[in-house]
Image (cartoon, rainbow, N blue to C red):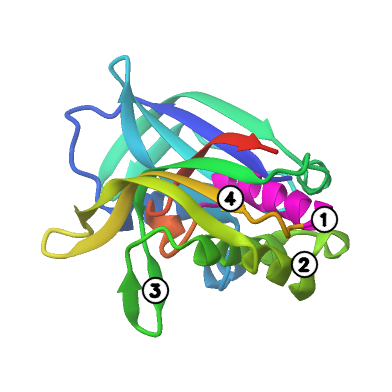
């Protein structure tokens, strides 16, 4: 079932790990067949590497309704081997997410650059409608049929969601030794208008909790669009 996977790594020398290597390491960890690699919607999301107490932490989101595969004790970022010191898995079922308490406000923090790709153009801003649609698309790609969110329900949320507040900036992040990607880093507060009914507020809460696992926007399997849900309130 959906889960947050937290790895503690021994990454000696602190080499620069580009997004493509994050993606490759996650594929090696979480894909078990060639068909998995060919999927349009991969069953995982990737967070950035960050330091805690002299060790490197890495947060991954597992999105499908079955358990993630057993994790090895070594991760490779390209040609850089990295022992895994600890693994923590926190599972949350789609049934539990679907039963989320209705909410009208959500406080999010983007922990890696967020951007959307629209008709070949990048949109590096936290557009509230695109955030909801991105989460809903990933939800419906991986959730069991009984928990599919209907288009009517998604429209009820996108038709009432708005950007209440934001604080942050756009940043240019290295994608490779020669390429960069612009995205938004910072905090965002989303709200629903008074016209949002009980059902829309439940879907809103479920999608934002799921987005904390699945990421938002483009290249979530490469470390972009990772978010932390800091608050849901009525």
Q: Cα distance, mark 1 to mark 2?
A: 8 Å
Q: Which residue is mark 3?
A: 117
Given residues 73 and 160, the one toward you in this image is 160
* Dominant SS type (magenta): helix
Given residues 98 and 127, the one toward you in this image is 127
Contact (Cβ within 8 Å) of mark 4 with mark 1: no
Q: Cα distance, mark 2 to mark 3?
A: 24 Å
Q: Is residue 188 visible?
A: yes
Contact (Cβ within 8 Å) of mark 1 with mark 2: yes
Choose mark 2 or mark 4, whichever is in front. Answer: 4
- Classify mark 4: helix, strand or loop: strand
Given residues 120 and 51, the one toward you in this image is 120
Q: Is residue 158 within the magenta segment?
A: no
Q: Residue furthest front?
A: 194
Q: Residue furthest top?
A: 53
* Numbered range of the magenta stretch: 197-215
Q: Position of residue 199 (x, y in %)?
A: 82, 55
First reached walking from the N terminus: tag 4 or tag 1: 4
Q: Which residue is mark 1?
A: 199
Q: Cα distance, mark 4 to mark 1?
A: 15 Å
Q: Position of residue 96 (x, y in %)?
A: 80, 41
- Classify mark 3: helix, strand or loop: strand
Q: Which residue is mark 2?
A: 153
Q: Which residue is mark 4?
A: 191
Q: Cα distance, mark 1 to mark 3?
A: 29 Å
Q: Quadrant of residue 55?
A: top left
Q: Cα distance, mark 4 to mark 3?
A: 23 Å
Q: Is residue 156 placed above or below 26 in the rendered structure?
A: below
Q: Is residue 207 within the magenta segment?
A: yes
């Amino acid at each position: 079932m959906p889960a947050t996977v937290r790895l503690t790594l021994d990454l000696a020398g602190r080499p620069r790990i580009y997004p493509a290597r994050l993606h490759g390491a996650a594929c090696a960890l979480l894909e078990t067949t060639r068909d998995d690699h060919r999927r349009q919607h991969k069953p995982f999301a990737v967070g950035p590497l960050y330091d805690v107490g002299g060790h490197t932490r890495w947060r991954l989101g597992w999105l499908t309704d079955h358990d993630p595969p057993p994790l090895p004790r070594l991760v490779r970022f390209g040609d850089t081997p990295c022992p895994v010191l600890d693994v923590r898995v926190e599972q949350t079922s789609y049934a539990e997410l679907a039963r989320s308490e209705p909410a009208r406000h959500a406080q999010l923090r983007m922990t890696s650059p967020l951007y959307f790709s629209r008709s070949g153009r990048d949109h590096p801003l936290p557009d509230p409608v695109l955030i909801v649609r991105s989460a809903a698309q990933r939800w419906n790609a991986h959730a069991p049929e009984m928990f599919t969110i209907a288009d009517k329900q998604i429209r009820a949320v996108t038709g009432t969601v708005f950007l209440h507040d934001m604080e942050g900036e756009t940043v240019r992040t290295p994608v490779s030794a020669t390429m960069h990607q612009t995205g938004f880093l910072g905090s965002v507060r989303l709200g629903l208008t008074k016209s949002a009914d009980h059902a829309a507020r439940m879907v809103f809460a479920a999608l934002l909790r799921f987005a904390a696992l699945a990421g938002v926007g483009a290249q979530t399997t490469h470390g972009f669009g990772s978010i932390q849900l800091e608050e849901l309130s009525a």
